[in-house]
Image (tube, rainbow, N blue to C red):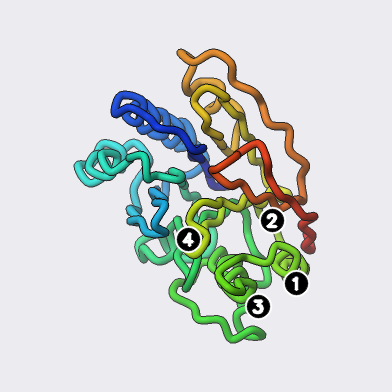
Amino acid sequence: MCGQCGIILGKKRRTRKELNRLGNMFTELLRYNERRGRDATGIYIVDKNGVGKILKAPVSAMCLTESIEYQEELQNISNKTVALLGHTRFRTVGTPMVNDNNHPIESSHCVGTHNGTINNHDELFGKHEWKRTGQVDSEAIFRCADDCIHDGKLDMGEFSEKLREFRGTMSFLLFNRQEPTAIYVGIGNMPLCLRYHPKLRCLCYSSELMPLVMTGKEYKGWRLFLKSAMTLYRFDITNLMNWDSVPMNFNV
């Protein structure tokens, strides 16, 4: 198992104090999710311009979040930030000592995280002749998404249909750099919990509910998002409460 956690930021003008608090909440989510994977930890701060820096290393969440590099990245959170994506890895396929195997995973157009195992990843890479950067099975999801991006936008129906070829377990977060205000959330057969705060205009997510409950307790009014499994969602920061979705089917 791995841990996925983060914050999707709805459109809102935030003070430096608010941005710092969101950064602290993100740190708390990562540390609470450390129990799900200590082999590697990574983050990606998504920018409205479709750019952002991936920071990841074969260390625990506590170790990464105490680093100077991590603290510097938190200072880059601004009103241009779309989302904070985090991952704590429990090694399955691919050694964490090769950083390309750690999450977030980067493909030609996408950056994302995955919890689960794709059992037929070698077969998929061979069949579709996808470029492969690392050894990790998760990369197949984001290479598949690359093939489904047309005129800059991910075709959710096509992507969902192609995921039928996948065998295994998955839930994932995906950012298409050509859609800089959107985040895709695939809730499959691995746990992923979400909750929303209307005043903060942010959507927090975690592989387990407990980190969400323990994070941001000073803010009242959190609403648990009860989302259907085996569904692909698209959230746009202009209105997080107006999402798109399609069924997501694959072979377990």
Task: Classify residue 202 as left or right of residue 245.
Answer: left
Q: Secondary structure at mark 2?
A: loop
Q: Using the image, determine if residue 76 lies above or below residue 23.
A: below
Task: Pick whichever, 3 or 247, lies toward us.
Answer: 247
Q: Amino acid at mark 3?
A: Leu
Question: Do the numbered discs 2 and 1 sit on residues whose CB atoms are within 8 Å?
Answer: no
Q: Amino acid at mark 1?
A: Glu
The answer to whether residue 127 is above or below residue 22 is below
Q: Which residue is mark 3?
A: 124
Mark 4–mark 2 Cα distance, whole angstroms, equals: 19 Å
Furthest-left residue in this view: 68
Select label 3 or label 4 by which is in front: 4
Query: Can residue 42 be seen at all in this image of the molecule?
Result: no
- Residue 84 spot, x, y in % from top left: 43, 43
In the rendered image, which residue does mark 2 sit on?
A: 169
Q: Position of residue 20 (x, y in %)?
A: 32, 29
Amino acid type for the residue under numbered disc 4: Val
- Secondary structure of the residue carrying numbered label 4: strand
Q: Residues within 10 Å of mark 2 (few under 14, many from 20)?
A: some
Please name the residue shown 61% across and 74% down the image.
150
Q: Position of residue 225 (x, y in %)?
A: 68, 31
Task: Let me know if residue 209 appears in the view.
Answer: yes
Q: Quadrant of residue 129?
A: bottom right
Image quadrant for the C terminus?
bottom right
SS assignment at label 1: helix
Residue at the spot of label 4: 111
The residues bearing labels 1 and 4 have C-alpha atoms spaced at a distance of 21 Å
Q: In which quadrant of the rendered view does residue 239 lie? A: top right
* Residue drawn at (53%, 64%) of the image: 93
Camera-nearest label, 2 or 1: 1
Secondary element under disc 3, as helix, strand or loop, is helix
